Image (cartoon, rainbow, N blue to C red):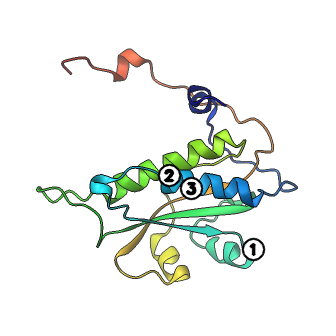
Amino acid sequence: MELYEIISERRSVRKYDLSKQIPEEVLKRVLDATRLAPSAVNFQPWHFIVVKDPVVKEKLKDAYPRDWFWTAPIIVVGCVDTKTSWKRKDGADFADIDLAIAMDHLILAATGEGLGTCWVGSFDVLKIKDIFKLPEHIKPVVMTPLGYPADKAAIKTRKKMEDIIHIDKF
């Protein structure tokens, strides 16, 4: 798929085809696209936990108890390292922004491979930290299921360009 087609085809998928596993070479391409994302000062303050083990997935249900989420063969947990992230002079920490860019690379690469994802940030952070025994400076920010969609998810309505794009003034 061409980039603009991938961008327009991307959907939040909430139903996965359990009979279809992700080939290892496809997963590696998606994760490599994630790794290649830009970050502030190239610090790359991210870590990605790829969860395949059903036992680990079962533990994670305590942190995000939505049934649809666990039907994907893989869950990716995106974390930031607040010790290594770049901080602007006013103190703003760019870790979450850097991770968001990398996750967008993951999501678009997955779409290009025919996979579905769904950005989820409303999980219990403390439970995720406990399950993975994350050090204090490693913060889980986002999770996404990763798998082949069971059906074509509908796209949500997007705002018009004139409502969000401002040229030379607000």
What's the amino acid at mark 2? Met
Q: Residue at x 15, y 60 (%)?
A: 91
Q: Residue 48 versus residue 125: which sits nearer the camera?
A: 48
Which tag, 1 or 3, sits closer to the chain's start?
3
The quadrant in which the N terminus is found is top right
Count all numbered tags in the image, as a single digit: 3
Q: Under tag 1, what secondary structure? A: helix
Residue 62 to residue 31: above or below? below
Residue, disc 2: 103
Residue 27 visible somewhere in the drawing: yes
Q: Residue 27 versus residue 11: which sits nearer the camera?
A: 27
The quadrant in which the C terminus is found is top left
Mark pair 3, 2: CA separation: 11 Å
Q: Under tag 2, what secondary structure? A: helix
Q: Residue at x 37, y 15 (%)?
A: 162
Q: Residue at x 59, y 62 (%)?
A: 76
Instruction: Please tell me the numbered disc located at residue 83.
Output: none
Mark pair 1, 2: CA separation: 23 Å
Quarter of the image holding residue 109? top right
What's the amino acid at mark 3? Asp
Kindly give the residue lying farthest to the left in the view shown.
89
Give the left or right position of residue 117, taking residue 44 as reference: right
Residue, disc 1: 54
Find residue 8 and report its horizontal and vertical position in percent.
Answer: 59, 28
Report the mark closest to the observer, 1 or 3: 3
Residue, disc 3: 32
